[in-house]
Image (cartoon, rainbow, N blue to C red):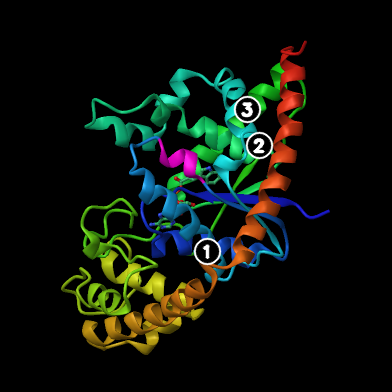
Amino acid sequence: MKKRILTGLKPTGDLTLGNYIGSIRQMKELESDYDSFLFVADLHALTVFQNPSELHERIRKFIAMYIACGVDPEKHTIYIQSENEFLPAMNWLLECSTYYGEASRMIQFKEKSKDNANFTVGLLTYPVLMACDILYCDAEYVPVGIDQKQHVELARDIADRFNKKYGETFKLPEFYPIKVGAKIYDLKDPSKKMSKTEENPQGVIGLFDDLDSIRSKIMKATTDSLNKVCYDPENQPGISNLLTIASVLSGEDINSIEKRFEGALYGEFKKYVAEVVTSKIGQFQQRYKEIINSKELDEILDRGREKSRELARQKYELMKERMGVVR
Ligand code: TYM
């Protein structure tokens, strides 16, 4: 039997090139070798207040874009997290196996609660729901960008604690290490992650952006004054980020791109990167238009919902039994 991999993306803003490279692309590449689960983490989006109609629209857009990016719905179980009501039910049982200390030590929680006196309780317990997402179906590997690694490790710790206390219930999941592109950086400020919720859109390439604006963002990306196209994240973070993006999207390795642009001006190199990115995203957008209103999308989601609900129901019943909360 194939091992299971699983990942989810949170619809707090439109999908970015970082999400594609760090997450969706991995699933696409691994789908033939693993039993693959891919979902929209809409319940996770609620940890920060959302505009309901925008959130509603984004959920379907995410699913259509996964498929437009090349994820094969025949090889994947694709679903919407909130359509599986056993996940929040499991969540309570796992919250009671998670220490406040470990949840409050999560880097993302610390960052997001730092300058915000009014953060929700959900922001703190967010990684517990993420653990449920992973553990209900015994996922063995979780392909995520580096920013989510700590959450996967926490899921493993919670599962291990539960198994030791109540008896073998969960498989212990592992972070799936991504070789290139585990963190794509903001084009304007290459010291920080490219993020859906970034306020300055100039540094972020969205998968729904129009192609001219993508071109212009890349041409204006922050670089340095060293004037050499060289992969050196420490001294040339902007250029290194563009090299990573171009390499992942073109399939050409970084060394060979560096060689081709030896002695070239940054403008020339950026033009090439813009060409690679717009050509790829242009293909995604074309397919997206064909899929977004199709009936097929609902059939895929119905299938995914049934399969994920049944697995989660079984795991939830087992957890209750193990914990003694049965009639
Ligand atoms: P989210 O929505 O923040 O990000 C979705 C995925 O994209 C990756 N990612 C990046 N990778 C490389 N470079 C970037 N700049 C970049 N930005 C984002 C993230 O690492 C992630 O893999 N908590 C999760 C959603 C989630 C989940 C899960 C994931 C909920 N349950 C269970 C895996 C398993 C999140 O907020 O991802």
User: Which residue corresponds to mark 3?
Assistant: 90
Residue 44 versus residue 187 in the image, above or below: above
Q: Quadrant of residue 228?
A: bottom left
Residue at x 65%, y 29% (from the top left corner): 159
Q: CA distance from mark 3 to mark 2?
A: 10 Å
Residue 243 versus residue 305 in the image, above or below: below
Question: Which x, y percent locates residue 118?
Answer: 26, 26
User: Which residue corresponds to mark 2?
Assistant: 135
* Helix, strand or loop for disc 2: helix
Query: Circles 3 and 1: CB distance less than 8 Å?
Result: no
Query: Circles 3 and 2: CB distance less than 8 Å?
Result: yes
252 horizontally vs 321: left or right: left
Q: CA distance from mark 3 to mark 1?
A: 28 Å
Nearer the observer, 300 or 281: 300
* Helix, strand or loop for disc 1: helix
The span picked out in magenta is 41-46
Nearer the observer, 43 or 145: 43
Q: Is mark 3 within 8 Å of ligand 1?
A: no
Residue at x 21%, y 32% (from the top left corner): 115
| N-term mark: 3 or 2 | 3
Nearer the observer, 121 or 165: 121
Main secondary structure of the magenta stretch: helix
Residue 179 in view, yes or no = no
Question: Which x, y percent locates residue 6?
Answer: 62, 50
253 horizontally vs 29: left or right: left
**Magenta residue check for 145:** no
